[in-house]
Image: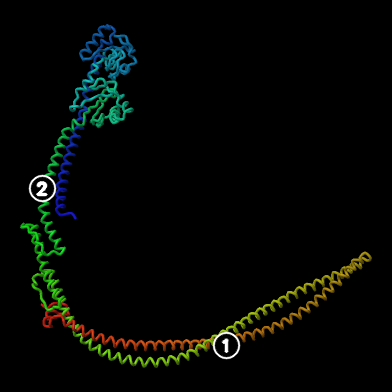
Amino acid sequence: MKSIKYKLLVSFLALVGVSVLLCGGVGIILNYTSAQNMMQQALELAAPLAADRAAQELNTYRTAAEDLGMVSKLSDDMVSIADKEALINDWAERYGMVRGNLLDTSGKSLLDGNDYSDREYFQHAIQGESWISTPTISRVTGELSIMVAAPVWEDGIDGGTIAGVVYFVPDETFLNMIVESIHVSDNGSAYMLSKDGYTIADPDASLVAVENIEQQASTDSAYQSLANIHSQMRAGETGYGRYTLNGEEKAIAYAPISGTDGWSIAVYAPVTDFLGSTITSIVIMVILLVIIILVSTTISISIANGLGKPIKACVDRLTLLQQGDLTSPSPVFNRHDEIGVLSYATQDVVETLNNVLGDMGYLLGEMADGNFNIRSRDYNFYRGDLKAMINSIRRINRKLSHTLSQISLAAEQVSSGADQVSSGAQALAQGATEQASSVQELSATIAEIDGGAKENAESAKEMKELSDQTGNQVSFSRERMSDLKSAMNDILNGHQEISQIIGTIENIAFQTNILALNAAVEAARAGTAGKGFAVVADEVRNLASKSDQASKQTKEIIERSAQHVTAGNHLMEEVDNALNQTAELTNSVIEHINIMAGNIMAEADSVTQVTTGTDQISSVVQTNSATAEESAAASEELSSQAQLLKELVGRFNLRSEEDCKDYDFATDTFIE
């Protein structure tokens, strides 16, 4: 279990720690965020300014070339080449450019004779557009050069006929000088990119026209974040970003340079240049936060000890009280706050419980010794809810005293009643013995009756079985007679069918006889040729005559058989009726026999039950006799125990009825 000192200390430290860390963290975050915003704003402001300055510088050279292109001497054929060259050189010197040149419309130089028609700046200028080329290595001088070209107008009229192209070559370092002059921080700088991603101006001149970060990123992933920014610069975008190169994080802002062929300028600075002072302030703030936390911890420990130790001392004393220690001294703190109140309350609780438990021990001890005529030493010990305890003990005292008095009276009554029960039990035992003898004689007589009833029941059972067999035989005879009747009916039905068949045979014989007569007539007509046929006809007629006689005889025999069958059928019906009457009489006899057998068996069962009941009565009478004897013995024992109980109750010092008048037993309350 965690102590209150620990909880207070943790609460104070958590409150102070969270407050300090929250305030310090918010301050650090705001400081760091503000520094980052200032850095971003400074770079985002510097990039467009640098782009404008570069555009102005380039525009100065562009304007110089355009102004010279509108000088009529350059397009006048009457002016010598030497004069034109002198004019160009003077113009270049005036504007701080290295050299100049004059080209005709075919791109051939009028000064050195070289052909410049394939140059990008010539192709733009001959179309009437002034042009500043990307810094490249000159094929004539082999040096890094920037060409500023403009059209030469016929008679100096702008927008008229183009007579040629004039171009100048500024100092190759002028772009580098522009970026060198840009300083946004101690270690910050700037550089320019061409539309192809090559560096065209940088404080490190060795990188000009050589370095291409996007190409380097294809082989070295460390340049990838910067390459992404260069890609946005080549797209002509204005923006801000951060990248890490060689372990150093830098911030960069960029903007396109107007009036150029996709040039862009970038201004960058190491993040530490802007965040150095911020980081220093953050470190100082962290140190202050640590100091504040340490001081707060010391104060919190002091407060926790001042509150926790007194409370722990009181808790320890109450723990001892919980373990049954009523004698150890209680802690005392003379303070005028809640700690002082807690100290006094702890001391008062211990003293009160000591007094209460001591008085209760006295009262219960006296009652344990048999003395119920006692009182509390001081009722003022019991305050508040403790009064219920002394009242409970008082009720116990009154009730036990009253109960023991009642037990003493009851013991006397029990002793007197036990003597009377003993006398009655002895008389009951004697009567039960006489009843047992009479019941045994009755049981023997009923046993003889039971034997005869069982023999009658067996005879009735056998008679019932014989009658059942007789009934079954009669039923069987009826079934056979029914089968015989069905057979006779089948014979009659067969007689009718045979009669029909004989009728058919007679008809056939009759027809055959007619045919034989016809054949004989035809044979007679035929004369000698029909004699053989006549013989056959006679034979057929004789055969038909015999068939007719045979069928008639058969018919007579069948009719006589049918008459005999009909007579037999009548006799069979009479026999069947006689069997039915016999069956009915037999069933009636069987029914009466079954009823008589059932009655005999029921009488046998009743006699058996009477025998069983008589045995039970005999057993009960014997049990009553034994119980009466035991009751007499128990009554004598009860009488002796009642005397002993009376002696035991007499050992208690009970309250008199006068002393119990302050307690109402009906309502279980004290009478004030």
Which of 198 and 429 lies nearest the eye of the viewer?
A: 429
Disc 2: which residue: 299
Instruction: State the image quarter where residue 265 is shown.
Output: top left
Quadrant of the frame with the N terminus: bottom left
Coordinates of residue 105 in the picture (x, y in percent): 32, 13
Location of residue 275 with respect to 200 vertically, above or below:
below
Which of 265 and 453 lies nearest the eye of the viewer?
A: 453
Work out how far the residue at label 2 is from the one at label 1, CA to CA, in angstroms: 123 Å
Give the structural element (helix, strand or loop) at label 1: helix
Contact check, label 2 and label 1, Cβ < 8 Å: no
Q: Is residue 387 left or right of residue 90?
A: left
Q: Amino acid at mark 2?
A: Ile
Badge 1 crowding class, 10 Å Cα cut-off, few under 14, some 14 to 19, many 20 or more, is some
Instruction: State the image quarter where residue 190 is shown.
Output: top left
Q: Amino acid at mark 1?
A: Val
Coordinates of residue 591 in the picture (x, y in percent): 55, 86
Which of 12 and 570 lies nearest the eye of the viewer?
A: 12
Give me the residue at 84% from left, 72% from top.
544
Give me the residue at 34% from left, 14% from top.
117
Location of residue 266 with respect to 391 vertically, above or below:
above
Badge 2 crowding class, 10 Å Cα cut-off, few under 14, some 14 to 19, many 20 or more, is some
Disc 1: which residue: 589
Location of residue 442 with respect to 502 vertically, above or below:
below
Instruction: State the image quarter where residue 465 is shown.
Output: bottom right
Which of 304 and 57 lies nearest the eye of the viewer?
A: 304
Asked if residue 163 can be seen in this view, the reply is no
Quadrant of the frame with the C terminus: bottom left
Q: Earlier in the sequence, mark 2 or mark 1?
A: 2
